[in-house]
Image (cartoon, rainbow, N blue to C red):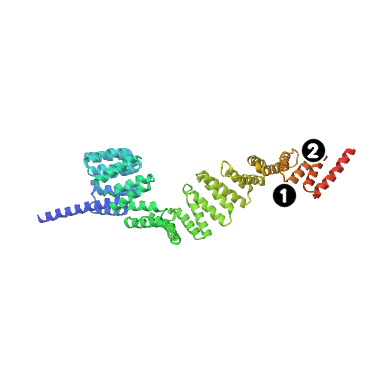
């Protein structure tokens, strides 16, 4: 009789320890402390391999980390005697749901519900959670199951949190908000409810509200790590020092993960601790090898850039571009690479990277700024065609473009040998800025002269004539005006001489040169020469 009493006492003790351990494991699971949860559930199963609830919780721990293979391997180790238990059926259904076998999953869930006659709220909650968390799960079905569960257990705040999560999956924020508030009515210290309310407002970018709820989550349970991590994320770029405080508190309450070191590296960089950031980033590259997050190369590059080591920075940026997938590369990466190449006297390479980044520029103002930078770089390398291209793009539709931009575009076209385009640009210049139309006429004349090199068509003549007429209307021509008059008269005299053979007309143009510049020996020489040719011709 004494042995029987002792044995019953031992069973009671083990059962109590098991219940306490499972509760501790659930707490770790809710807190996203997956390694700790795994350890607890493994410990329970080592003592009680037929504890179906522990198998279910351990499987859920793996599935929340998207470790389906580990979940499958775990369930394969379960003894045959437990495989028809409701919790085990839910665990297996959850695995099937996460491997896209929805029909099979449904069968296992229904078996679990039939065995419990849909009266076990915890079983129903586990099925609902599986549907909420799985990509192929049905939030609508989860809500139906939770409705049944709440009729079985009307005081359970966890069921209402799950209901809110289901509504969030359906993008029904108002219904989710109401569910979480009802959860708090049942349990005012539900850190999960406060946290999920914060996530609603985080999706709406309402910082005042989500900060309030995340802080309330911590007040409700100061060991709730996800809320600390959410606060760290909020302050990461606006107050890195404060973010570091929250991250330190998060780490003391969470299981260590490989991501922690990446986050620590980010914080070191953002708090301007460049040398420690570089060292930790290098350690991670060595630790993770091919699986390392490529952005670390960029972080190292930015750190060296801040330390004025441009050459080393460029080397790491090049490694970043070699290792990162194109879809993850952002505009700033291309801009930074262009800045580094410019600083090292390689504007042509800078242009290459800026061009690659053009597709990522979303706003019009930013696009025009890129066009202007590209035109400047093209000018530095004497690439007139590229300069013309980018100046043209900068000018088109740009309300902030000025006469200087238009003129430079036309000049770049001219230098690039794009004479028809130059003619069009300078024609626009003369039309749009009549007070400066001499510039437009002059370069139109030069552009057409470059097209009609043999002077057979006289394409430049009308533009030189417009130039002369405009300058003649000025009371006191400038030195530049006089220079352009001489050029215009020379060209028109050459055209009359060589193409039209009208020597008297040519002589008149040379005389006009002398009127502008009486000491012009060349004009006088040609007048003498043409007069002799005129006399000779008339003598015949």
Helix, strand or loop for disc 1: helix
Dot 1 surroundings within 10 Å: few (below 14), some, or many (20 or more)? Answer: few
* Quarter of the view holding residue 122: top left
Residue drawn at x 79%, y 49% as measured from the top left: 520
Residue at the outermost right position? 539
Between residue 503 and residue 343, name the one nearer to us.
503
User: x and y percent of residue 337 in the render?
Assistant: 52, 53
User: x and y percent of residue 415 in the render?
Assistant: 66, 47
**With respect to residue 449, does 381 lie above or below?**
below
What is the spatial separation of the Cα atoms under label 2 and label 1, in whole angstroms?
30 Å
Helix, strand or loop for disc 2: helix
Which of the marked residues, 2 or 1, is nearer the chain's N terminus? 1
Question: In the rendered view of the protein, which quadrant contains the N terminus?
Answer: bottom left
Mark 2 vs mark 1: in front: 1
Residue at the outermost left position? 1
Q: Is residue 101 left or right of residue 523?
A: left
User: x and y percent of residue 9 in the render?
Assistant: 15, 54
Residue drawn at x 71%, y 48% as measured from the top left: 478
Residue 479's label in the rendered image is 1
Between residue 333 and residue 20, name the one nearer to us.
333
* Quarter of the view holding residue 389: top right
Residue drawn at x 40%, y 57% as measured from the top left: 241
Q: Is residue 485 left or right of residue 236?
A: right
Residue, disc 2: 500
Q: CB atoms at circles 2 and 1 under 8 Å apart? A: no
């Amino acid at each position: 009789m004494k042995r029987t009493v002792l044995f019953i006492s031992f069973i009671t003790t083990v059962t109590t320890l098991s219940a306490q351990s499972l509760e501790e494991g659930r707490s770790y699971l809710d807190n996203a402390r997956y390694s700790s949860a795994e350890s607890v559930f493994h410990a329970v199963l080592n003592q009680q391999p037929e504890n179906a609830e522990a198998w279910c919780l351990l499987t859920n721990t793996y599935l929340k980390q998207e470790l389906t293979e580990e979940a499958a391997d775990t369930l394969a180790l379960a003894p045959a005697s437990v495989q028809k238990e409701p919790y085990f059926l839910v665990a297996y259904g959850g695995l099937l749901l996460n491997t896209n076998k929805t029909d099979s999953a449904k069968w296992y869930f229904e078996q679990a519900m039939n065995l419990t006659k849909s009266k076990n709220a915890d079983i129903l909650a586990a099925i609902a959670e599986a549907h909420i968390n799985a990509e192929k799960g049905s939030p609508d079905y989860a809500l139906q199951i939770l409705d049944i569960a709440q009729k079985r257990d009307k005081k359970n705040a966890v069921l209402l949190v799950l209901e809110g999560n289901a509504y969030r999956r359906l993008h029904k924020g108002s219904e989710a908000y109401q569910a979480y508030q009802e959860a708090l009515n049942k349990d005012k210290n539900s850190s999960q409810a406060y946290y999920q309310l914060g996530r609603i407002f985080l999706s709406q970018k309402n910082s005042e509200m989500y900060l309030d709820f995340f802080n309330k989550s911590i007040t409700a349970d100061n060991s709730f790590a996800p809320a600390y991590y959410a606060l760290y994320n909020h302050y990461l770029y606006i107050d890195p020092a404060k973010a570091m405080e929250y991250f330190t508190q998060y780490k003391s309450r969470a299981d260590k993960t490989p991501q922690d070191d990446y986050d620590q590296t980010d914080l070191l960089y953002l708090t301007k601790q460049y040398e420690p950031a570089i060292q930790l980033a290098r350690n991670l590259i060595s630790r993770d090898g091919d699986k390392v997050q490529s952005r670390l190369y960029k972080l190292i590059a930015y750190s060296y850039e801040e330390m004025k080591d441009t050459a080393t920075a460029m080397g790491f940026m090049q490694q970043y571009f070699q290792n990162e997938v194109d879809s993850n590369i952002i505009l700033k990466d291309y801009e930074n690479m262009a800045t580094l190449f410019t600083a090292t006297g390689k504007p042509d390479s800078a242009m290459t990277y800026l061009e690659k980044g053009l597709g990522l520029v979303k706003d019009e103002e930013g696009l025009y700024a890129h066009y202007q930078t590209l035109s400047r770089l093209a000018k530095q390398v004497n690439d007139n065609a590229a300069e013309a291209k980018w100046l043209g793009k900068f000018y088109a539709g740009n309300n902030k473009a000025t006469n200087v931009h238009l003129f430079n575009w036309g000049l770049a076209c001219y230098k690039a040998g794009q004479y028809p385009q130059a003619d069009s640009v300078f024609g626009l210049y003369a039309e749009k800025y009549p007070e400066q139309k001499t510039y437009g006429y002059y370069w139109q004349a030069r552009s057409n002269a470059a097209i009609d090199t043999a002077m057979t068509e006289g394409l430049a003549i009308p533009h030189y004539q417009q130039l002369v007429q405009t300058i003649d209307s000025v009371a006191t021509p400038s030195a530049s005006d006089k220079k352009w008059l001489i050029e215009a008269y020379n060209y028109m005299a050459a055209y009359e001489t060589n193409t039209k053979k009208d020597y008297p007309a040519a002589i008149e143009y040379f005389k006009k040169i002398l009127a502008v510049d009486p000491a012009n020996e060349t004009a006088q020489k040609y007048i003498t020469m043409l007069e002799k040719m005129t006399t000779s011709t008339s003598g015949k």
